[in-house]
Image (tube, rainbow, N blue to C red):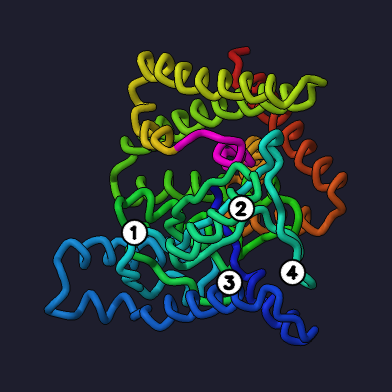
């Protein structure tokens, strides 16, 4: 699941107050209060590192975070601001819990729309208990529901997002999140998830490659890529079964027949995963995903929004790997209408291929 942008709740709560409505005020109040609690807990990383009473393991990972943050601005040309320069221990395993829901016979997630804030396909809660209560009400209405913990959330630079205890489990996960979320602060096109996520993921991948080289750990990049390949294999498997469900729900058959076929497809997903895992042990990390019940909502949370990575990679190559020039090109493209954005990225792929081909011909012995 993507890291959610919870800036929308802050816009929406203002809108609701101005309009004199209290329909969603309780929900937005918990969002604002929850975020404010995170901000209150945040302390400068340097002061924590310098404290004699702090656990040595925490000091080590925060020292890495401090170095990554400096590397992000100086070497990757990502925004040089106060984001990820502070640390907050939330004393819980996740930053927020997202509730998603889908009708019994649809893989399209329910959306909640708000004045001036647009629509989102989840409800985020800073309390697991609140999330579960809301989920129970949706189940009572007949929805397939899933509640999932999310280690981090982004405000897209509107606030100085801190490092959280919920996502410091490994060096690469920490680097991935910092580089990815700072990339969203460089360019973010409202309503174009594929563009945004492909761009940020390319920056994440390139950032991790350069970070590991900077640390003298280039050999670890292959392991990182292997994990991404496992993620792609898992996503592809789930999405293929989600498409089977979509086809089923469009058939002109009775609800009873759909329920039987739906159960068969979900059971087949489990079986196919076990079969795939037997030949690709790296997928073992996804076993926990199958612990909770499978339903439309759970399958709908697995999405691939990175189809444009090759285009952004080509664009970076055309800029000779210069991140500042690359960002300038992406900013220019991001201001174009959607069809023209797609054309510009496709042109970058074509130009990069032509340049590569010309280089190969030039290098051939005469």
219 sits to left or right of 28: left
User: Which label's residue is closer to the chain start, 4 or 3?
Assistant: 4
Quadrant position of residue 360: top right
Tell which tag, 4 or 2, sits nearer the viewer. 2
- For label 2, the crowd category at 10 Å Cα-Cα, with few meaning under 14, some 14 to 19 and many 20 or more, is some
Residue topped by disc 1: 93
Q: CA distance from mark 1 to mark 4?
A: 28 Å
First reached walking from the N terminus: tag 1 or tag 4: 1
Q: Which residues are magenta?
A: 293-305
Q: How would you classify the magenta stretch by its main secondary structure?
A: loop
Residue under label 2: 138
Residue drawn at x 80%, y 84% is 19
Residue at image coords 50%, 80%: 33
Badge 3: residue crowd in 10 Å (few <14, some 14–19, many ≥20): some
Q: CA distance from mark 3 to mark 1?
A: 24 Å
The secondary element bearing badge 3 is classed as: loop
User: For residue 117, which numbered disc appears in the image?
Assistant: 4
Ranked by sequence position, the earlier of labels 2 and 1 is: 1
Query: Marks 2 and 3, Cα distance to the nearest angstrom?
Result: 32 Å
Residue 65, position in %: x, y? 34, 63
Residue at 47% across / 62% down in the picture? 96
Count neighbours of disc 1 (C-alpha within 10 A) and say few if under 14, some if 14 to 19, many if 20 or more: some
Q: Nearer the viewer, residue 13 or 306?
A: 13
Q: How far apart are labels 4 and 2 at the CA level?
A: 22 Å
| 85 or 132, nearer to the observer | 132
Q: Can residue 25 be seen? A: yes
């Amino acid at each position: 699941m993507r890291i959610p942008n919870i800036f929308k709740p802050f816009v929406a709560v203002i809108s609701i107050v101005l309009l004199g409505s209290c329909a969603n005020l309780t929900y937005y109040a918990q969002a604002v209060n929850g975020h404010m609690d995170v901000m209150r807990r945040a302390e400068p990383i340097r002061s924590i590192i310098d404290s004699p009473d702090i656990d040595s393991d925490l000091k080590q990972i925060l020292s890495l975070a401090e170095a990554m943050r400096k590397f992000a601005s100086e070497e990757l040309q990502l925004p040089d601001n106060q984001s990820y320069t502070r640390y907050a221990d939330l004393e819980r395993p996740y930053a927020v819990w997202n509730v998603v829901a889908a009708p019994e016979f649809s893989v399209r997630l329910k959306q909640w729309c708000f004045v001036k804030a647009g629509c989102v396909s989840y409800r985020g809660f800073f309390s697991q208990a609140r999330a579960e209560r809301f989920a129970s009400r949706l189940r009572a209405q007949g929805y397939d529901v899933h509640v999932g913990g999310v280690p981090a959330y982004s405000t897209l630079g509107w606030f100085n997002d801190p490092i959280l205890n919920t996502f410091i489990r490994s060096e690469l996960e920490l680097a991935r999140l910092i580089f990815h979320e700072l990339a969203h602060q460089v360019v973010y096109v409202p309503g174009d998830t594929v563009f945004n996520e492909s761009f940020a993921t390319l920056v994440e991948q390139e950032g991790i490659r350069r970070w590991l080289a900077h640390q003298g750990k280039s050999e670890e990049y292959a392991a990182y890529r292997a994990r991404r390949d496992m993620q792609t294999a898992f996503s592809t498997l789930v999405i293929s079964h989600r498409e089977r469900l979509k086809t089923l729900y469009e058939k002109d058959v009775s609800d009873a027949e759909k329920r039987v076929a739906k159960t068969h497809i979900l059971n087949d997903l489990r079986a196919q995963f076990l079969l795939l895992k037997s030949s690709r042990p790296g997928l073992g990390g996804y076993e926990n995903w199958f612990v909770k019940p499978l339903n439309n909502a759970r399958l709908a949370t697995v999405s691939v929004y990175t189809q444009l990575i090759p285009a952004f990679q080509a664009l970076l190559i055309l800029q000779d790997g210069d991140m500042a020039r690359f960002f300038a090109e992406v900013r220019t493209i991001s201001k174009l209408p959607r069809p023209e954005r797609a054309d510009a990225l496709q042109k970058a792929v074509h130009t990069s291929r032509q340049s590569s081909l010309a280089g190969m011909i030039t290098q051939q012995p005469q």
